[in-house]
Amino acid sequence: MPRTRIPAITLALVAIGFAAMFVSTAVKGLYQVYFVDLATHFGQGRAQFAWSGSVFMLATGLMSPVVGALSDRVGPLRTAAAGALAAGIALGGAALWPGSLTFFVLMFGLAGAFGLAAMTFVPMGILVDRLFEERKKGLAYAVVTNGTAIGFIVLSPLWIWLQPQAGWITAFGVAGAVFALPVAGALWLTSRWEPASAPAPCTAGADVPAWTVVRRDPVFYALAAGFFGCGATMAFIDVHLIAYWQGQGVPRLAMGYAMSTLGALELASGLVSGALALRWDKHRLLAAFYALRSASMLLLLVPGLGVLPFAVGFGASYLGTVILTSMFCFERYGSRIKGKVFGLLFLGHQLGAFLTVQLGAWSFDATRSYQHSITALVAVTLCSAACSWLGLRRAGPLPALAKGPAHAAVPEAASR
């Protein structure tokens, strides 16, 4: 049979989603590179200042169900446009009024968190869900989310190079203006092209809140437990990794090269996971990605090994966990609630991130080392692998969502 050509408008929307994911990496990337400078500016130790990042991580998780519901209602690209505006206000506001730590936390920790959540995985997952048939969604989502990989490859070395050249106020101010004006405007203008959501059937949990559906579903808890480990390790990269390498005396050029390598392998991870999911059991793939993540964190503790082996291992696991988790979510839950459920999963993801940011900083201040934090993350991601292997073996569509409304409030444990 001849292959169906993908319409040009669909390809354009995929490119727009990719671009939104690409520029969104600047929100966390600037904070990551300027973390020590920011702590010094506000007269804080790392543990004292890390709570700003903890608030950001937790708020991003709390915003994820909100942006999922907003994407279902007004569309993912309009939601992303609102997120770009919020990110611009957050970064620009922090630069314009740099004298107050409380104001910085309100801007970056709350407005910036909404901005990042609204421009990344949840809305873009809903965009892909609207654009593609079931078989193509995994690979399409991998392509869109690889915007973050290119962000690592291109933007992370740029921020590392920029940090000694320009202060954080200048960097935040310029980035804020870019987000608030051209990025938000472009997303809003192109949102008119996105398709509306498909009409939902009267059954399939039509009027039932997402939490009511998932709270008795063991598969949701297996996904959330695994995603907790994903968020915990990603947060270490976003906040503590550069500081850890700086403390180890890693040269600036080597750090930039490692982050680019991580991004390149992240790019491959996204594409490979989307393709392999068409041929292999997804629960085994997801468990393998988490096991690889655990091994890569362990490499950080090996003396004299250098930064490249870690970057290769972590990058290879980076997007596979996100893409496969989204595929489980979108296949299992009905069209009316899968955006909201994905948001709930990202709340679990960001709870892991919240704990890593704060506990990692406390551990460093207490011991002057990140070794205890890294060891804990090795164990957490091993648990994520076990949850995926054992808890997702029979994670097909949820039977309750194929029944009438009377059954939707009492989902069955399909994985038993």
Image (cartoon, helix red, strand yellow):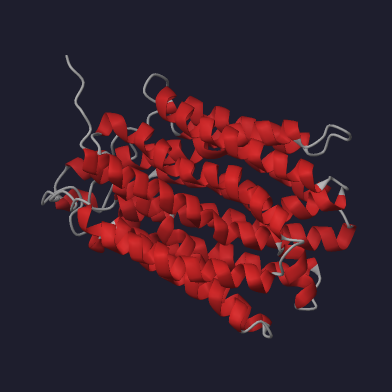
Q: In this view, does 233 lie above or below 133?
A: below
Q: In which quarter of the image is residue 412?
A: top left
Position of residue 86 relative to residue 2, above or below, is: below
Seen in the image, is 210 located left or right of residue 326? left
Left or right: residue 229 versus residue 42 is left
| Residue in front for this viewpoint, 143 or 345 | 143
Residue at screen point 65% across, 52% down:
158
Quadrant location of residue 80?
Answer: bottom left
Q: Where is residue 160 in the image (x, y as percent from the top left)?
A: 71, 53
- In the rendered image, the vertical position of residue 104 relative to residue 134, given as above or below: below
- Residue 43 seen in render: yes
- Residue 159 placed where, x, y %? 66, 56
Q: Can you say which quadrant of the picture contains the N terminus? A: top left
User: Residue shown at 30%/31% (left/top)?
Assistant: 136
Residue at x 34% of width, y 61% of height: 186
Residue that appears at 54% across and 42% down: 149
**Above-or-below relation of 110 to 267:** below
**In this rendering, position of residue 204 left or right of residue 231:** left
Residue farthest along the front direction in this orientation:
165
